[in-house]
Amino acid sequence: MKALFIGHTYVDITFVTDHIPEGDEKTVARDYAVAFGGNAVTAAFACAKLGIVPDLLSTVADDWLGRMFMDMALAYRIPVHARKVARSSLSFIMPNDGKRAIVRCRDDAYLHPFPMLNLDGCELLHLDGHQGDASIAYARLARERGMLVSLDGGGVRSNTLELLPFVDVAIVSERFCEQLDRTAEGTLDLLREKGVKVGGVTQGERGLLWYEGEAPARRLAALQVPEERVIDTNGAGDLFHGAYVYARLSRPQQSWDFCFRFARAASAYGVQFLGNEARLPRVDDVFATAKAAGDVLPQT
């Protein structure tokens, strides 16, 4: 195993409609997509599509949606270490004007303890905060083994503050900052205090505010995608995480600036497609997207 991702599995149903029905009304969507979902899960699929297939420790139910998800993982050759739940989780997503509305149906009542895996040869652990018991246990083990630990801080969870001292790279959302009642700058200060070596806050159209080590925070501007080409922004952050993990593993000699620029281009590519599977880029798609936006990335 090269990398291990830990998260919660969703099946995402994304639909585009001009009108949400009310009461006894019906309507027909203009388009739809069905794909895998979940923060670390989507990041794992992105990393696999780019060329490094990670292992995935995630929730799986013994129902038809769970079997469909396992078929999706098989298509990408992702080894899934299932933590059983009674029912699959669903997300209903409606993109609209660069934003998205989401209804989630989640089962996180785990029927068994998390499995203990052999981490020999594993270089990186990526977490999204779900499965808090597994996250903290594997983060501690990763730190003991000198593995890089990455966190997708999409939201503050019950043990996030306990987890942060074991995290090397934490990229969090504006929602994360709001939940802590901190500014982006204040959140970066917190990450530094917790010992996070590379930290950042994603800020949508304003890009990424981030730091490395003791250096002052700096801003990586977002790549501009023409408004008419933005189809679906859901999952763009998950794609960002999967892409910087891939960049770090595939090009360890490159800087974090390169990794985040690579991930930025991957996200800019992804928002032009509907649904998580359609948005996954190949490596050449990422370089082409960056070049079209005026950012020529070194390819070695």
Image: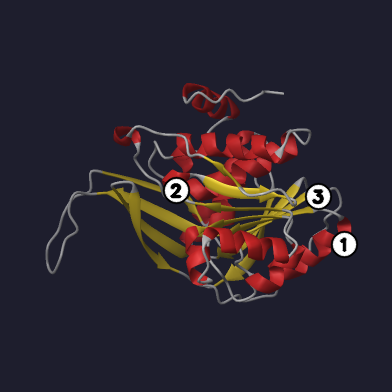
Q: Position of residue 51 (x, y in %)?
A: 66, 34
The residue furthest front is 216
Question: Is 149 situated left or right of 274 in this image?
Answer: right
Question: At 64% from the left edge and 70% from the top edge, which residue is drawn?
Answer: 160
Name the mark on residue 133: none
148 vs 267: above or below? below
Res 251 → quadrant: top right
Q: Earlier in the sequence, mark 3 or mark 1?
A: 3
182 vs 41: above or below? below
Residue matched to label 1: 144
Disc 3 crowd, CA 10 A, few/some/many (<14, 14-19, 20+): some
Res 111 → quadrant: bottom right
Q: Position of residue 135 (x, y in %)?
A: 69, 66
Q: Position of residue 200 (x, y in %)?
A: 60, 52
Residue matched to label 2: 204
Question: At 73% from the left edge and 69% from the top edge, which residue is drawn?
Answer: 136
Question: Is 123 situated left or right of 266 in this image?
Answer: right
Amino acid type indicated by mark 1: Glu
Disc 1 crowd, CA 10 A, few/some/many (<14, 14-19, 20+): few
Question: Is 142 situated left or right of 14 in this image?
Answer: right
Q: Position of residue 214 (x, y in %)?
A: 74, 52
Amino acid type indicated by mark 2: Gly
Residue matched to label 3: 122
Mark 2 vs mark 3, foreground winner is: 2
SS at badge 2:
helix
SS at badge 1:
helix
SS at badge 3:
loop
Q: Earlier in the sequence, mark 1 or mark 2?
A: 1
Question: At 64% from the left edge and 67% from the top edge, which residue is drawn?
Answer: 83
Q: CA distance from mark 2 to mark 3?
A: 32 Å
Q: CA distance from mark 3 to mark 1?
A: 12 Å
Mark 1 vs mark 2, foreground winner is: 2
